[in-house]
């Protein structure tokens, strides 16, 4: 499973403070910790429309000083921000995100055609707002797939995000997620499915119980990537354990290696 570290997000209070104060040490520390926990990508999100591109560029620059191999997930609602940041990244990363909204695909897909190793997260969303049902999500999926074919982008480059809302107010959130993942997988066996996993538990106590249940359930329906908190040891152990159970980690090789390196934080 691809782990995209969620921590460098201006929606988190400590991070927005660090951004405001241009606290380099804090940001670099959070990057290092997530990479030590084997995050494959670091999601970076300013959490504000003001100076969005400038903030992301600052994070890219200071993190690449310590980690020249780092791969970013450029998380911005503004496609121009993403296009500005791509040339600064030393390694191909992920674009987070496109959808059928506001001509984003028309701006972003040409850049993906020119930067072939970049991946793209596609939200199953259109102008009409948050999709309530599996059917609406599938309609958006087909709309996006049309564009993917039109631009000649390999399906393998796209990570489809069926969208996760908090189960506190959306009781069908998980069921809609897995229902959509299942249908996508039926049409395209190798399609990638991603989630903003921690969204599932917004506003609820003991979030990691909900997050953990979502992780295991969604992986069973083909989720092979998540924007999540790799610093949460239980969640990280959950990823490795579920991969072993699903047969994607034969002979538990990765699980054993992570345990030996005390990634789960349980060795004496
Ligand atoms: N899809 C895509 N991108 C996204 C989201 C998505 N980007 C933003 C968001 N949703 C995913 N990122 C976060 C980041 C932090 C939290 C939730 C989603 C969060 N963090 C708590 C904190 O750090 O305080 C702790 C979470 C926990 O306890 O696990 O709430 O849906 N494409």
Image (tube, rainbow, N blue to C red):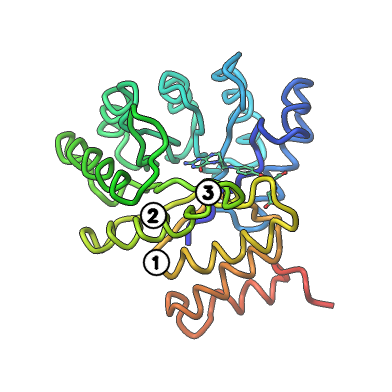
Identify the element where label 3 is drawn: loop
Between the residue at mark 2 and the residue at mark 1, the CA separation in whole angstroms equals 9 Å
| Quadrant of the picture in which ligand 1 is shown | top right
Q: Earlier in the sequence, mark 2 or mark 1?
A: 2
Above or below 253: residue 6: above
Identify the element where label 2 is drawn: strand
- Estimate how packed mark 1 is, as few (under 14), some (14 to 19) or many (20 or more) residues with alpha carbons within 10 Å: some
Q: Earlier in the sequence, mark 1 or mark 3?
A: 3
- The percent coordinates of residue 228 (x first, y second) are 59, 52
Between the residue at mark 3 and the residue at mark 2, the CA separation in whole angstroms equals 20 Å
Q: Are marks 2 and 1 in contact (CB under 8 Å)?
A: yes
- The percent coordinates of residue 57 (x first, y second) are 57, 23
Q: Is residue 105 left or right of residue 74?
A: left
**Residue, x 67% and y 75% (percent of image)?**
259
* Residue that protrudes farthest toward the top in the picture: 50
Q: Is residue 225 left or right of residue 109?
A: right
Q: Residue 103: which numbered mark, if any? A: none
- Mark 2 highlights which residue? 193
- The percent coordinates of residue 147 (x first, y second) are 20, 35
* Residue that protrudes farthest toward the right in the picture: 268
Q: Quadrant of residue 148?
A: top left
Single out the mark in the foreground, 2 or 1.
Answer: 1
Q: Earlier in the sequence, mark 3 or mark 2?
A: 3
**Residue, x 36% and y 60% (percent of image)?**
179
Q: Could you say which is closer to the camera, residue 109 or residue 181?
A: 181
- Mark 1 highlights which residue? 221
Q: Quadrant of residue 103?
A: top left
- Mark 3 highlights which residue? 170
Single out the mark in the foreground, 3 or 2.
Answer: 3
């Amino acid at each position: 499973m691809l782990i995209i570290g969620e921590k460098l997000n201006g929606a988190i209070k400590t991070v927005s403070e660090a951004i405001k104060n241009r606290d380099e040490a804090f940001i670099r520390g959070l990057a290092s910790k997530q990479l030590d926990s084997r995050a494959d990508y670091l999601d970076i999100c300013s959490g504000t429309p003001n100076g969005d591109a400038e903030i992301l560029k600052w994070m890219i620059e200071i993190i690449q000083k310590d980690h020249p191999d780092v791969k970013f997930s450029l998380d911005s609602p503004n496609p121009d921000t993403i296009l500005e940041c791509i040339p600064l990244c030393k390694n191909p990363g992920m674009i987070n995100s496109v959808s059928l909204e506001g001509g984003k695909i028309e701006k972003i897909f040409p850049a993906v055609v020119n930067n072939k190793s970049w991946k793209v997260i596609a939200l199953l969303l259109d102008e009409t707002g948050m999709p309530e049902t599996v059917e609406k999500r599938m309609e958006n999926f087909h709309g996006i797939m049309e564009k993917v074919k039109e631009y000649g982008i390999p399906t393998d480059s796209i990570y489809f995000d069926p969208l996760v809302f908090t189960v506190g107010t959306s009781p069908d959130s998980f069921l809609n997620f897995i229902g959509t993942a299942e249908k996508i997988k039926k049409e395209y066996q190798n399609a990638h499915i991603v989630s903003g996993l921690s969204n599932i538990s917004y506003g609820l106590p003991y979030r990691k119980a909900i997050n953990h249940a979502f992780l295991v359930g969604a992986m069973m329906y083909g989720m092979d990537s998540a924007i999540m908190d790799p610093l949460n040891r239980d969640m990280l152990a959950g990823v490795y354990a579920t991969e072993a159970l699903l047969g994607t980690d034969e002979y538990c090789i990765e699980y054993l290696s992570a345990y030996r390196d005390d990634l789960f934080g349980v060795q004496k």
